[in-house]
Image (spheres, rainbow, N blue to C red):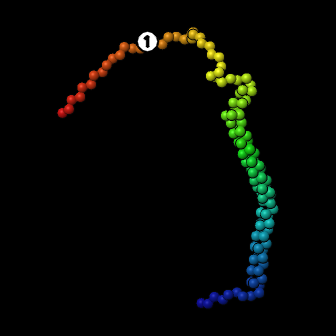
Amino acid sequence: MSTRLDLSAATWRARAIRYVAIYLLLALALVTARSLTQEVRPTLRAAQEREAALTTERDELELRVQALGNPQRVRDWAFANGMRRFAEAPKKTAELTGVPAPAPLPARTTVEVTTAWR
């Protein structure tokens, strides 16, 4: 038995129409996907710019915190607001009242241990 290939013009025309229809559907799918995602890139760029701005602001604020936390600057601020060094401040002593006396310690007991080797 021999099988003959159908090489008629009608068969080729049907195949051509089928392939063109498939290509048109693929092109339509790609154009639709592109139109649905066209806002993604500008949104991503805007988010990256916001991230860069926030990173820069964070770095600047971190530097300001470090500068404000400088011990010399804190000391200057304290002196400007009337604070004094502990060593230079007048000291007053007073008895502590209202504090109960500690409980007496229990009598000491000793423990003897004997080790026997066998």
Q: Residue furthest bottom?
A: 2
Look at the picture and state if 26 lies above or below 14.
above
Residue in front for this viewpoint, 2 or 86: 86
Numbered disc 1: secondary structure: loop
Instruction: Point out the residue furthest to the front here.
Output: 88
Q: Nearer the viewer, residue 63 or 51?
A: 63
Q: Please name the residue that numbered disc 1 is placed on.
A: 104
The quarter of the displayed image where residue 30 is located: bottom right
Q: Tell me which residue sits at (24%, 26%) in the image.
A: 114
* Kind of residue indicated by mark 1: Pro
User: Residue at horizontal 46%, vertical 12%?
Assistant: 103
Residue 35 position, x and y percent, is 81, 62
Residue displayed at 74% across by 88% down:
8
Judge whether 98 appears above or below 66 on screen: above
Q: Is residue 44 left or right of residue 104?
A: right
Q: Quadrant of residue 17?
A: bottom right
Residue 40, x across and y down, in percent: 77, 57
Residue 17 seen anywhere in this rendered image of the structure: yes
Q: Quadrant of residue 20?
A: bottom right
